[in-house]
Each structure stands twice: as C-alpha cells, then as structure tokens.
Amino acid sequence: MINDEDVLKMIDQNIQKECRNIHISLRDKLTLRRDIFNSIRRLDVLEDFIEDEDVTEIMVNGVHSIFYEKNGCISDSGRRFSSKERLEDIIQQIVADANRTVNTASPIVDARLKDGSRVNVVLPPVAINGPILTIRRFPRDPVDDKKLLRYGAVNEEILGFVRKLVEAKYNILISGGTGAGKTTFLNVLSEYIPKTERVITIEDSAELQIRGIENLVRLEARSANVEGCREISIRDLIKASLRMRPDRIIVGEVRGEEAIDMLQAFNVGQDGSLSTIHANSAKDALSRLETMMLMSSDIPVQAIRKQMASGIDIIVQLGRLRDKSRRLLEILEVDGIRDNDISTRRLFSFREESESNGRVKGGFIKENELIHRDKLCRAGIDI
C-alpha cells in the first residue's frame, strides 16, 4: 500500500511537470499540493475544517453548500465539492471506516470519524437537495470541570454537589437540547467515578471520552447490513451489559424503546448509572421518557411512573443561551409519586440578571436541600 509520503512525492512531481511553463508562486503550489493530497487521502474540501480545532460543526447541504460553526457562529464557507459523486465518495469513505452502511435503501446513518467526531448522513431520496453530511466535532483536549468553571457553565458549589452524588452512586439523567453540551457534561461526571469500579458504556455511535478508568468496557450498536449481519441495538447491548458484572452502566443517549431497559438497569441494582436525553426542560425529560416507554410497551402508565420515580434520582438540565454560551440551567431531585404523578424538587437553577456586550449575565441559585440522602449515608459522604 502506498504511504502518504509516496503520495506527496507523486503530487510534487506532477505539479512540477505541469507548472514547468507556467509561473505559479510557492504559496499557490503549496496550496495546490495540500488540496490534491486532501482529495486523495483525506476528506477533500472538508479537511481544512477538520484540522481547525475551533470549528465545532460542519454542515454539508448537498454539493454546493457547506456551512460551519466556529465560536458559536454559523458561516457559509464558500467551498463546494467538485461533483455529487465526489461527495458521495467521501460519505462512503467515512461510513465504511466506521463499519456502517448507507445507501438509497437505508439512507440514514450515524457514524463517527477516527478522532471521535459524530457524523450523521442523510441521502436521497430522503434528502431532497442532495447528500447531507453533518459532523459534530469535539475538542481534542476534552473539557474538564476546570474548563466548565472557566466558561461559567457551572459554579464550584454545583460541581462539588454533583461530584458527591456521582461518588454516592445516584442515578443521573442529563437533559438538554441539541448542542447543549450533554455529552461533554457526561464526560465530566464520569471523571468522578471511583477508579476501582467496572464501567460499561453503551452508545449508538461511540463518542464518550471516559478517562482514568482501567476496568472499562465500551459497547457500540450496529446496524444491519447487506452482508447479512443483523442489527445490534442499544436495547440488546443494555441486556448484555447486565451479564458483564457492571458497577455502573453509562448509556450515551436514550431515544426509543431502549428507555425500558435503561430504567430496568437503574432499578435492578446498577446504582450510579448515567444517561442523556433530548428535552427542553428537566420536566420535559420525564414526559419524553414516559412517552418512549408507552410507545414501545404495554406497561400501564402508573407502573411506568413508579419505575421512573424509583430509578432516576437526579435530572440535570443543560441549555444554550441566546449568546451561544452553554450553561447548567437547573438540577431537579425526583421525589417519588404524588397524586399519581412524578414529584420533583428544584435544587439549583440559573437566574439571568442582565445582558452586556452580547453576553448573558446571571448566577446560580440554590433553591432547596436534597431530601433523599440514603445513598450518601451508605457511602459515608457528608453533603
């Protein structure tokens, strides 16, 4: 197999040959060299955005439209692919590297790049304006609790509080909209897990960055393919994980029928488990989880609510404010069943105070004390 150095030598030789009778500056030659190499070995016109660590999202809306997000602002790149076939080649390259399949028969797929970036692909006929490729990038240097403090996403009191909850094995559900920082916050919470525990992560597309835990098992769902490999769903992986002697189970995100098995895991002794869910508020997270379970089972709604109230201890709501900053918006404690509904108590919340130079100003308010402290007592932790 030809290595990258040999490819670069061939490119240099051809540039020198073609430009023998044409004056081209050294800068233009280097740019041409890089562009040709990227088209052969990398992701073509997308490679410049991949290499820019400040770019957090790349949005390809067909051949002629590429947008990117940088420092919270979305801009038109002015770049384009040379043809629809070239864009489709790049998509197939990404999907194949992630051991996934996408085609007109199965036109939607989630995958990841080698650096952990999240990828979503939607092909025609589902996508009207051509192949759609969306890449969510994560920092090469993962965000830790110190960075969250620096960004103003949380304060020291909240971090100290959630750290004790994780150490005491409270089951925590992290909620928020798209781009609110759920995966980042989950990674931060995982740093508080004792290093001696056995942790199993379950994801649709592996992107969690769990550090410092040696006894770690990472499981990733698999789609069915034309070669006869059957689908392995998140639900299948949750069931399998219970036979692996886990101390904790971390489910990257619940979106459907796997919500039942996640709650079962929360309720059968896997205390300290973590997961994320898309929702506009902490209360909405409970409603959405309930809806998922109702749509995929015949369990009565009261039985579902009892399972949720028993399995989930804490809900952390994250959000993205109008100035594009990410903040923790509230922490709710699940307080059992009251009047046939799930009762909650708000422990912390973010209060907006003003806006200056386009930045939202505010502070975190402690509203109530934690009621259910039995897990803290069993862990010997004083809050």
Image: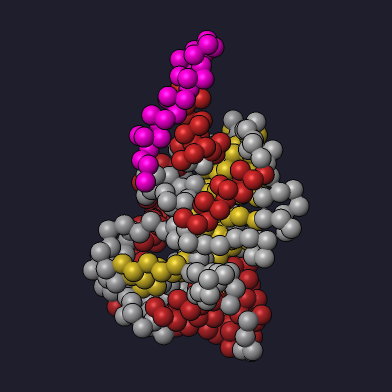
Nearer-the-camera pick, 86 or 91: 86
Asked if one can make out residue 198 in the rendered structure from this viewpoint, the answer is yes
Quadrant of the rendering where the C terminus is positioned? bottom left
Nearer-the-camera pick, 358 or 139: 139
Q: Is residue 82 magenta?
A: no
Main SS, magenta residues: helix
Residue found at the far right of this picture? 128
Q: Is residue 243 left or right of residue 184?
A: left
Asked if one can make out residue 281 in the rendered structure from this viewpoint, the answer is no
Q: What's the colour scheme?
A: secondary structure
Q: Is residue 190 left or right of residue 305?
A: left
Q: Position of residue 21 (x, y in %)?
A: 53, 11
Residue in the image at 54% along x and 80% along y? 260
Q: Position of residue 257 (x, y in %)?
A: 58, 77
Q: Is residue 378 left or right of residue 201?
A: left
Nearer-the-camera pick, 199 or 309: 199
Q: Which residues are magenta?
A: 1-29
Residue in the image at 56% along x and 36% along y? 45
Residue in the image at 38% along x and 38% along y? 4
Q: Position of residue 90 (x, y in %)?
A: 56, 47
Nearer-the-camera pick, 133 or 138: 133
Please, is residue 275 above or below residue 145 in the view? below
